[in-house]
Amino acid sequence: MQKLIAAGFAASLCFATTAQAMPDVAATPPQKTETPDSRPKQVVIISFDGAHDNKLWQRSRALGQETGARFTYFLSCVFYLERADRTQYQPPRMKAGRSNVGFAQDKAEIATRLDQVWKANLEGHEIASHGCGHFDGKDWTAKEWAQEIQAFRNIVGNAWKANKIDGEPEGWKNLVYNKITGFRAPYLSDDKPVQTALRDSGYAYQASGVTSGPELPKNFAGLKSFGLPLIPEGPSARPVIAMDYNLYVRHSGGKEKPEQAAQFEQRSYDAFMNAFNKQYNGQRIPLQMGFHFVLMNNGAYWNALERFARDVCKRDDVRCVSYHDYLAEPELNKRPAAL
């Protein structure tokens, strides 16, 4: 059930030295002592699903500029189509033009969004895929997932020309067709068919799973598989997926209660910090957190995110990075000895 409500609106280091043995006495290697300077940096991976609201594009980019954080944006392709052009999208098993999350209102909105995506890319954030129509593909075949993956590439790759928007950056198509190598499935569907389709389509990772706590990515025939962790939250410390929508459902049943926004913000911030501190003071496994471009409960979860990022991302021994950068930088994958 935890996994189903996650709709997107919607690594040990061994060390030994040799010692001179006394006659008939076995040498005992000295124990490794982990010092603050020798510990790996704590990694935090913050991502956004859907990434449609242009004001929140600006707000998230500003947070990245302020804190040095680099985010992963999982785009939904329907937000690069006007409703009038919706039949350009053919979802698996459905009529053309269907979408669970709507479409763009007009070409001006699309033009602004395209500009925001390109600027985020230039600033070092990762652009990744959330598919198109935000359907639950848990029963789709690998072939049907491949259809959805290709639809994303075609619609986003051709978005400037198809919408008659001038100024397409020279590297746009290279970004969409060659550099988008990460995926998060709507409803966090991470079954074998989607992983097979992603691997066969040249993707490096998927981030659709749910884990019992922060875990290192697993390997599926060359495809890295990440999962959002369950983290303790609230007075009873009940586990909840580290995603804003799940907090929204936990706090207010998925309905707006703006009068309790301050309380929900504080509970979320406390949950984020407690989950962070457990890893920061422990094994330093990356902490993953997911958000949407929707201000649920009067922005409580975005407010908590911004407080959290300002508190942790500027620390010398913390790196707030994208999934792509985590996989690309070997030093971020180092693990400390057991504490």
Image (tube, helix red, strand yellow):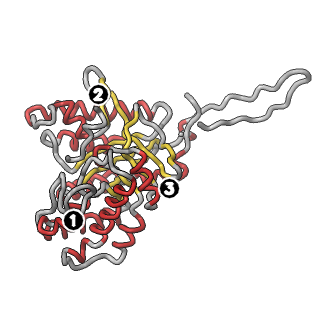
Classify 10 Å Cα crowding around label 1: few (below 14), some (14-19), many (20 and above): many
As drawn, the residue found furthest toward the left would be 259
Q: Nearer the viewer, residue 69 or 3?
A: 3
Q: Is residue 337 visible?
A: yes
Amino acid, disc 1: Tyr
x then y, percent, for residue 275: 37, 32
Element under disc 1: helix
Q: CA distance from mark 3 to mark 1?
A: 29 Å
Q: Which residue is mark 1?
A: 80
Q: Choose mark 3 or mark 1, whichever is in front.
A: 1
Q: Which residue is mark 2?
A: 233
Q: Are marks 1 and 2 in contact (CB under 8 Å)?
A: no
Amino acid, disc 2: Glu
x then y, percent, for residue 163: 19, 74
Q: Of label 3 and label 1, which has the lower sequence position?
A: 1
Residue at x-position 28% and y-position 64%: 117
Q: Are marks 3 and 1 in contact (CB under 8 Å)?
A: no
Q: Which residue is mark 3?
A: 328
Classify 10 Å Cα crowding around label 2: few (below 14), some (14-19), many (20 and above): many
Residue at x-position 42% and y-position 44%: 226
x then y, percent, for residue 59: 22, 54
Vertical arrangement, residue 237 with respect to residue 229, above or below: above
Q: Of label 3 and label 2, which has the lower sequence position?
A: 2
Amino acid, disc 3: Ala
Element under disc 2: strand
**Quarter of the picture holding the N terminus:** top left
Q: Is residue 125 visible?
A: no
x then y, percent, for residue 245: 23, 40
Element under disc 3: helix
Vertical arrangement, residue 245 with respect to residue 160, above or below: above
**Quarter of the picture holding the C terminus:** top right
